[in-house]
């Protein structure tokens, strides 16, 4: 059964029109779903009883349920959710000085095959619908409601490649960004891609205000192809050409995500190559400590080396941030908790 959270405002208006309802009913329904956050059509008191009865027949209000969660010493919380078809996905809530950020998944499993990533331990089963992604956010927001908290930022960087599920991801962003929905500002929503070049051009043409982040992780094609098979389909030259067109046409700052892997991509030479690659662009590098995955054999760069890498970038004219570690005492890597859960059932 389709979930009601799959519908953006236009789709909801069209659906209600088919049921003989005026368009203003869509705003009422959106308010019940996202402002009042009710999970029962029968509680929507300003909608006709015949309509709420029909909605209950046609739409689910339970896109997911919690299977388990892990809470780290720093408060980082990883949720494992089960979908209606029995598949599972993760979401991670992280606390920063600028607010709470929720990292959501966009697919069940992942086919990108990045060698350092736990998401690829279990191959892609299917895309998540927009409503299932909305369900991840709503579940955590309802948890935060209990203490007066709020999901301030959304990052679509969990399991899956967002641009391999482009249409659903864009609709998800529209729903959570809507003033009548969760009203999360466009510039507080970040979509990450490992470099699906055709969808970058689509995103550029859409002139969206959402942030775009690129999972780069290597400064040259030889190393990147070893770490990230996507480079064999769209190499750095193709990727950078697309990104420059996006940046020039949208006047938006890019983020390059760079996970530091000990002895692999954290040398001074890598830092200089990385600076040469992106210098002059409206962009910065987000250096990320690696959450180790036993099956992959990589190790995180120590704090001293990470800070030195940061200094080299800055001295070569590239702005960078060095993200603090989050959830390093739980299964915090993308896909890690799900893989443990699924392998445990085997």
Image (cartoon, grey):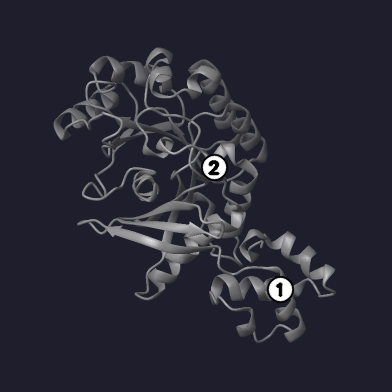
- What residue is pinned by disc 2? 125
| Residue at 40 percent of width and 36 percent of height | 121
Distance of mark 1 from mark 2, alpha carbons? 28 Å
| Residue at 67 percent of width and 68 percent of height | 59
Q: Quadrant of the N terminus?
A: bottom right
Q: Residues within 10 Å of mark 2 (few under 14, many from 20)?
A: few
| Residue at 22 percent of width and 21 percent of height | 263
Q: Is residue 277 above or below residue 194?
A: above
Q: Considering depth in this image, is 84 or 74 the residue closer to the camera?
A: 84
Q: Considering depth in this image, is 283 or 45 the residue closer to the camera?
A: 45
Dot 2: what SS?
loop
- Residue 215 relative to residue 307: left or right: right
Q: Considering depth in this image, is 346 or 307 the residue closer to the camera?
A: 346
Q: Considering depth in this image, is 345 or 329 the residue closer to the camera?
A: 345
Q: Residues within 10 Å of mark 1 (few under 14, many from 20)?
A: few
Q: Is residue 45 above or below residue 118?
A: below
- What residue is pinned by disc 1? 57
Residue 335 placement (x, y as % from top left)? 39, 44
| Residue at 39 percent of width and 18 percent of height | 226
The quarter holding residue 321 reads top left
């Amino acid at each position: 059964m389709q979930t009601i959270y799959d519908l953006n405002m236009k789709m909801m208006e069209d659906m209600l029109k088919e049921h003989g309802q005026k368009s203003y009913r869509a705003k009422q329904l959106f308010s019940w779903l996202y402002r009042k956050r009710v999970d029962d059509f029968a509680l929507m008191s300003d909608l006709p009883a015949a309509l709420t009865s029909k909605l209950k027949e046609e739409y689910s209000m339970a896109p997911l349920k919690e299977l388990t969660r892990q809470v780290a010493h720093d408060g980082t919380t990883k949720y494992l959710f089960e979908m209606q078809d029995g598949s599972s996905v993760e979401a991670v809530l992280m606390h920063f000085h600028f607010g709470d950020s929720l990292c959501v998944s966009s697919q069940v499993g992942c086919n990108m095959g990045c060698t350092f990533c736990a998401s690829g331990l279990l191959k892609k089963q299917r895309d998540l619908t927009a409503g299932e992604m909305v369900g991840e956010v709503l579940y955590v927001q309802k948890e935060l409601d209990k203490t007066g908290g709020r999901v301030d930022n959304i990052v679509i960087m969990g399991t899956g490649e967002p641009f391999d599920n482009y249409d659903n991801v864009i609709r998800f962003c529209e729903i959570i960004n809507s003033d009548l929905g969760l009203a999360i500002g466009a510039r507080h929503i970040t979509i990450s891609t490992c470099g699906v070049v055709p969808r970058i051009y689509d995103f550029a043409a859409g002139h969206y205000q959402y942030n775009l982040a690129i999972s780069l992780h290597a400064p040259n094609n030889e190393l990147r192809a070893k770490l990230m098979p996507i480079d064999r389909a769209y190499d750095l030259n193709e990727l950078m050409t697309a990104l420059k067109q996006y940046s020039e046409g949208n006047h938006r700052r890019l983020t390059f995500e760079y996970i530091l892997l000990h002895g692999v991509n954290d040398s001074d030479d890598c830092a200089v190559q990385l600076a040469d690659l992106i210098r002059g662009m409206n962009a910065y590098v987000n250096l990320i400590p690696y959450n180790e995955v036993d099956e992959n054999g990589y190790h995180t760069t120590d704090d001293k080396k990470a800070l030195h890498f940061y200094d080299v970038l800055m001295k070569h004219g590239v702005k960078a941030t060095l993200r603090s570690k989050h959830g390093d005492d739980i299964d915090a890597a993308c896909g890690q908790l799900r893989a443990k859960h699924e392998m445990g059932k085997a």
